[in-house]
Amino acid sequence: LSDLVREDLQHYYPRLVAKDVTITLIEALDHVLSMMDKQISDYTEKHFHRENIEVLMNTFVKAVKQREVIIQVKGSNEQTSIPCSVVVWATGIKSRPLTNRIREIIGLNIQSNRMGILTDQYLHVKGINDGSIFAIGDCATIEHPKLVDRIHHLFEEADTENRGALDLQQFRSLVERKINEFPQLEVFSKKIEQLFEEADKDNSGFLTMAKLRSALE
């Protein structure tokens, strides 16, 4: 759409395009291309910004009407309206029968994602012990490690002074160093001080492991 507007419509309707045409991408998650590597996601978001494409993260489409789209931001009860003339709906993918059959053969207790074949970050199919089978593309989805399952290890790694608690700088360093391994930390990185203060309920200036868990859950 951006290419169409910039390369074609701009040529034939320069005044109309400059004044009235905008493109908005509505994304339910906290970053685009969530199934891809974080670097790809970041690059895509920067590219959209350069193309003057507005991206609304953590936003749900509640209704599509003739001249407007009704949206709701995650965590809010308020709904707002975006005027529109063209809506492109890109969602609702379904696995192919072969993909589902492979999941069933491996075991649905292991291949638990209905959207595709689960792989690790190196695209090894989960449940194949010798790592001899890979999956890539629309048939597959990368399983990111769960943050809460690694909280004890992360805390010990960040507690460089072995005092059983993290100060603000250690908490910041932990979040920034682990973003590539845990892409979900990206949303925390934008409000580190706020998270620290909210978790440090007794104003001690430190986060215990229990406080760290509450901050990252």
Image (cartoon, rainbow, N blue to C red):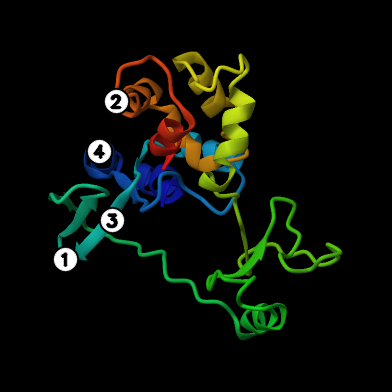
Mark 3 to mark 4 CA distance (whole Å):
32 Å
The residue that label 4 is drawn on is 15
The disc labelled 2 sits on which kind of residue?
A: Lys
User: Quadrant location of residue 51?
Assistant: top left
The disc labelled 1 sits on which kind of residue?
A: Lys
In terms of sequence position, does the residue under pointer 2 or pointer 3 come before the other? 3
* Foreground residue among 80 and 13: 80
In terms of sequence position, does the residue under pointer 4 or pointer 1 come before the other? 4
In terms of sequence position, does the residue under pointer 4 or pointer 2 come before the other? 4
Mark 4 to mark 2 CA distance (whole Å):
55 Å
* Foreground residue among 56 and 22: 56
Q: Position of residue 100 (x, y in %)?
A: 62, 81
The residue that label 1 is drawn on is 65
The residue that label 3 is drawn on is 60
| Residue 36 vertical placement versus 161 (above, below) | below
In the picture, measured across the screen, residue 72 lies left or right of residue 87, that is left
| Residue 66 vertical placement versus 71 (above, below) | below
The disc labelled 4 sits on which kind of residue?
A: Arg
- Pointer 1 local density, CA inside 10 Å: few below 14, some 14–19, many at least 20: few
User: Quadrant location of residue 123?
Assistant: bottom right
Mark 3 to mark 1 CA distance (whole Å):
15 Å
Mark 4 to mark 1 CA distance (whole Å):
27 Å
Foreground mark, 3 or 1?
3
